[in-house]
Amino acid sequence: MLRHAGGRLAQLVPTLIGMSILIFVLVRLLPGNALEVVAGDAGSNPQAVAAAKAQLGLNESLVVQYWHFLSGFFTGDLGKSYLSGQNVASILGRAIPITLELTILATVFAVVVGVPLGILSATRRNSSSDILSRIGGLIGLSFPNFWLATVLLLITSTYFHWEPSVTWIPFWDDLGGNLVQMAMPAFAVSLYLLAAVMRMTRTSMLEVLGEDFVRTAWAKGAGRRRVLWSHALRNALIPVVTLIGAQIGNLMSGSTVVEVVFGLPGVGNTLVSATYNRDYPVVEATAVFLAAVFVVLNLVVDLLYGVLDPRIEV
Amino acid sequence: MVNKVELPKGGRRAEALALSFAGQAEQAPRRQGAWRALLRNPIGMTGVVIIGLVILTALVGRFAWTKSYSAQNYTRLLSPSASHPMGTDELGRDDLARIIHGAQVSIEVGVVAVGVALVLGLLIGVTAAFYGGVIDAVLMRVVDVLFAIPSLVLAILIAGLLGPSRTNAMIAIGIVFAPSFARVIRGSALTVLAHPYVEAARALGVTDLRIITRHVLRNIISPIIVLTTIYLSSAVLTEAALSFLGLGVQPPEPSWGSMLFEAMPYMQIAPWLAVFPGLAIMLVVLGLNFLGDGLRDVLDPRVRDA
């Protein structure tokens, strides 16, 4: 298994490089000239344009520019924001914990609630609770997360007169205040995944419960709890892990819009406002960061299969 | 039921024979019966009804409700009443008319975007499966790289940098979903290409294009239909998200996503403005998900009992 893990790790590098080249090229190929942003109204003045070009390092060849960009991720020098002049690395550094916390909370919530609901649904197949949770699942899958976030804000502000804090409260400063602030956004990000996890747990539990080894377990007199939780669930969880892996991208997309609704200065929110403002160094850095996390998490999920199911060669 | 075999004409006899093997090789129920099976499936039926209503609204809604979606009035932020069933917005525009126009936008963007993804996916997927080797490897690595960027992030990048507009949103969503189509189509095409009747067709000297159109495409329609419905709902959601973020449909044209965004500052005094567009998005996505679920039940025999 270790050799396979090594092989997958080796695949990671070309994917990451390909992804960073794609983002680098996208940002440079598409219309909307970064020079106009830096040179401002002086854009028509050739001297100002030349100065801006030199300042941005745009006189260098694309290969050199790409090299600067790539090595920036290792040296921490990602350039400066065109807009605020702040270091891109420090902008990213402030945004990362918010997005990470949001996505982790959302995933934990989805698993903790979704898996038991799925089991319940599978073991009481076609009961009213099964049908209810199936319909609930489809509704959960269809609830646009930005609308959910808006409705949550509406309800809390109208009925509880609660307004989200304007700035983010770091969990290392005030855990309680942080959790109060993050609960609703995390729920808004989570609902889709929760519904998907529930549906997948149900389907795969139903499949596993029909397998021979489960019948054997029943036959040898294992208790209901033992059959369900240790025989069936362990096997049923494999597709659920696959699903969560496949949904990581959705989770990050979800956190992007929810961050915007709740005004959380996370990576997604930073990306959106930088895209508006054509603040290219920030766009590149945030997009590459989000994609890199995405790729690495997918790898982790792949490796997890091997742990869950020794039959699978990762 | 056996696959419908066309009457052999001249030299095509062997090819027709090969096609009849396809009927035996493929386990999926024939599509002629699929529509009826879909209507018998309660979830699929619900989806058909919801989507039918939405399409109807998009097509004839503006004739039934003739108020303009862009005419501004002094009657601002009116709560829902008989003359404005969904109230009016911050510029006094009739919200129902805007929702109706939004249905049109949603469907158009969704269909065109998925169409773009389907065409790109077919080109990439079938080419990769058919020619294999280096072409396959190169195309699939490109697909891997596109897959390495979360979909909304890529959509934001493309739509934002092309410049926010409805057309660019459609292009962006199409490009973002193309890799998924390419992968599924390549996989299904590989399965079809492994059948002896393809070999038979090759041995008979049938041209590549004809093998692709007649043998490959015909046999991968089922997975494509399911995939298309699933991605239609994602496309509608992505368009709404992009417009919500200001990177999609631009004012004064209403999109459900941008209507939601515009409603946010007035949420306390005019909550209906935030409720109706959200409900509309949800209804369409729900309908498409129901339809997709029903179609999968009908077209994919492996999950029929699940």
Image (cartoon, rainbow, N blue to C red):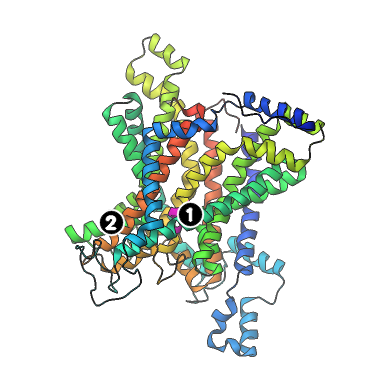
For residue A151, the mark is: 2
Identify the residue at image location x=55%, y=63%: B158
Q: Is residue A245 visible?
A: yes
User: Which amino acid, mark 2?
Assistant: Val
Residue at (42, 30) in percent of width and height: A203
**Which kind of residue does numbered mark 1 sit on?**
Gly
* The quarter of the displayed image where residue B189 is located: top right
Q: Is residue A41 left or right of residue A190?
A: right
Q: Provide residue A283's location: percent of width, then percent of height.
A: 53, 66
| In this picture, residue B36 sits left or right of residue B112 | left
Which residue in the structure is indicated by mark 1? Answer: B110
Q: From the viewer's perspective, is residue A89 above or below residue A243?
A: below
Query: Which of the pair B196/A31 is nearer the observer?
Result: B196
Number of the front mark, 1 or 2: 1
Query: How would you rate the neighbour count of disc 1 (Cα within 10 Å): few for under 14, some for 14-19, many for 20 or more?
Result: many
Q: Quadrant of the N terminus of chain B?
A: top right
Q: Does residue A302 sit above or below A165 in this rendering? A: above
